[in-house]
Image: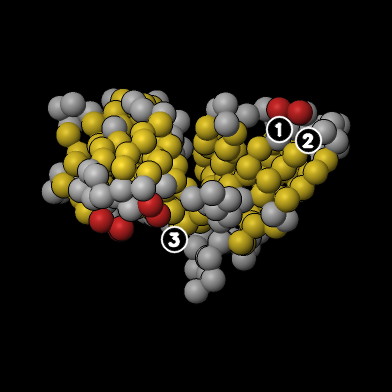
Amino acid sequence: KAGVTQTPRYLIKTRGQQVTLSCSPISGHRSVSWYQQTPGQGLQFLFEYFSETQRNKGNFPGRFSGRQFSNSRSEMNVSTLELGDSALYLCASSTDLAGGNEQFFGPGTRLTVL
Amino acid sequence: AQSVTQLDSQVPVFEEAPVELRCNYSSSVSVYLFWYVQYPNQGLQLLLKYLSGSTLVKGINGFEAEFNKSQTSFHLRKPSVHISDTAEYFCAVRTHDNNNDMRFGAGTRLTVKP
């Protein structure tokens, strides 16, 4: 089985631009979560989707948004980029709403905002 | 909301020595507990998890952890480490009700020296 894939792996943007990151979960997984990882703040939860519905949301501004498609693939969008948005963005999938289920992580998208 | 504290940001140890990475959590309700490992430029990989039952949990790569409810701890141990265990280790917690996100600790950088 293929693992979680994220595209692109690396991205460089400038302040004020917007960006869309993509995540393809493991086949059969219906839950997708997104995390932001930075040296200063560590791993922070962004949102979780299940069956195309956002089930949980972390404490991030409205510039961060996401969606999930009927095939469980997910995208997240960040508008009006700020320098502080530079981070590794990780996507994780699980068979059902995470709970006690294992989350399988992708390799991440490294976003650099200049 | 739940929270996680990893008591050591860095743990240096010599090859073949035992190691313990400490994790304490806080939650007003029952929780699931996890340990993940992150190798450079990769996503997170699950080492082990505690859902219920036996408090001693065995995971991959020879790691184990013990859930201690009275001390709200979930320390990770390995009796003999290898150079290849050098990585970042994250403790995580999620409540049973699935309405809360996965909370990660700040991480412990394990460095195994020859």
Residue at mark 2: A113
Q: Label 1 neighbourhood size at 10 Å, few (<14), some (14-19), many (20+)?
A: some
Same subunit under labels 2 and 1? yes
**What's the CA distance linking mark 1 and mark 3?**
29 Å
Residue at 69%, 54% (x, y): give it.
A9
Q: Give me the disc on residue A95.
A: 3
Write down the quadrant of residue B111 in the picture.
Answer: top left
Q: Do the CB atoms of the residues marked 2 and 1 lie less than 8 Å apart? A: yes
Q: Label 3 neighbourhood size at 10 Å, few (<14), some (14-19), many (20+)?
A: some
Helix, strand or loop status at disc 3? loop
Mark 1 or 3 closer to N-term?
1
Q: Chain of mark 3?
A: A
Residue at mark 1: A85
Looking at the image, residue B77 sits to the left or right of residue B101; the answer is: left
Helix, strand or loop status at disc 1? helix
The extreme front residue here reads B114
Helix, strand or loop status at disc 2? strand
**What's the CA distance linking mark 2 and mark 3?**
33 Å
